[in-house]
Image (tube, rainbow, N blue to C red):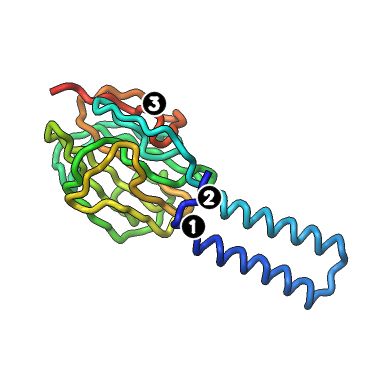
């Protein structure tokens, strides 16, 4: 398992901070040997947790144009038909997946096609499961046009802890199904908007694995 490039700087800085804290305790507080060992162990565990957050597991890349795969690891929190009012402007099936701080935070492209639209929205940092987070939080919107001209919208949403969203997509890019499309740092949510006649495979509360779990099947046109 490799470490995602988005974590290199944070991992390095956090490692230096942990080392600095340990050094301050050692030189300024004159602690007992036991306290020094306990403090060191706690700092190492903290650093390992931060490092693990940026893990990027190696997964089999699956291709099936009729399926929509989960764009992230997490748990399904919304499945409903809503009116998508940012770009596609029609009723669509929304599936929302909440990512806790223990989940892998790489985001994958759930379908294949051409990136038609991308926009970063500045916003608030409500908890990611809040109903208003989809429209009020810091977020990105990516729209992919499929071969049959239908469109899929993916929205990365920052949460209360997450403060930075990374997205590698630009208009005109070829989107490869289940290839990495970005990263959200420290807890968040991903919404995906599908044609409302899609066959839904998941329910609220279901755990999903990014790039591996089919969440819906697209109807043939």
Q: In the rendered view, would you say 217 is above or below 193?
A: above
Residue 31 in sight: yes
Place residue 79 in its image quadrant.
top left
- Foreground disc of the pair 3, 2: 2
- Per the model, the C-alpha gap separating discs 1 and 3 is 32 Å
Place residue 99 in its image quadrant.
top left
**Callout 3: SS:** loop
| Of the image marks 3 and 2, the number of the one nearer the N terminus | 2
Kindly check if marks 1 and 3 are in contact, taking CB atoms under 8 A apart as contact: no
Residue 160 in sight: no
Residue at the image point whose x is 20% and y is 39% from the top: 113
Q: Which residue lies under the disc numbered 3?
A: 203
Q: Position of residue 182 (x, y in %)?
A: 36, 50
Q: Which residue lies under the disc numbered 2?
A: 53
Residue at the image point whose x is 24% and y is 28% from the top: 65
Decide if residue 43 is on the left or right side of residue 147: right
Q: Which residue lies under the disc numbered 1?
A: 7
Residue situated in front as seen by the camera: 165 or 1: 1
Kindly check if marks 2 and 1 are in contact, taking CB atoms under 8 A apart as contact: yes
- Foreground disc of the pair 1, 3: 1
**Callout 2: SS:** helix
Residue at the image point whose x is 39% and y is 26% from the top: 203
């Amino acid at each position: 398992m490799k470490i995602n490039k988005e974590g290199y700087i944070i991992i390095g800085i956090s490692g230096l901070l942990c080392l600095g804290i340990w050094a301050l305790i050692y030189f300024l507080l004159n602690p007992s040997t036991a306290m020094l060992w306990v403090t060191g162990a706690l700092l190492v565990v903290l650093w390992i947790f931060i490092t693990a957050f940026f893990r990027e597991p190696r997964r089999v890349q699956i291709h099936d144009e009729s399926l929509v795969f989960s764009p992230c690891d997490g748990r399904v929190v919304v499945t409903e038909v809503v009116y998508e009012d940012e770009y596609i402007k029609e009723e669509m099936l929304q599936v929302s997946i909440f990512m806790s701080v223990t989940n892998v935070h790489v985001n994958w492209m759930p379908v294949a096609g051409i990136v038609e639209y991308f926009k970063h929205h500045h916003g608030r940092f409500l908890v990611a499961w809040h109903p208003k987070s989809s429209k009020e939080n810091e977020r990105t919107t990516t729209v992919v046009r499929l071969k049959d001209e239908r469109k899929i919208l993916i929205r990365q949403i920052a949460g209360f802890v997450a403060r930075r969203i990374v997205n590698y997509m630009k208009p005109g890019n070829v989107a490869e199904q289940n290839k990495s499309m970005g990263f959200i740092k420290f807890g968040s949510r991903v919404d995906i908007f599908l044609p409302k006649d899609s066959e839904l495979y998941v329910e609220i509360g279901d755990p999903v694995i990014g790039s591996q779990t089919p969440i819906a099947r697209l109807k043939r046109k």
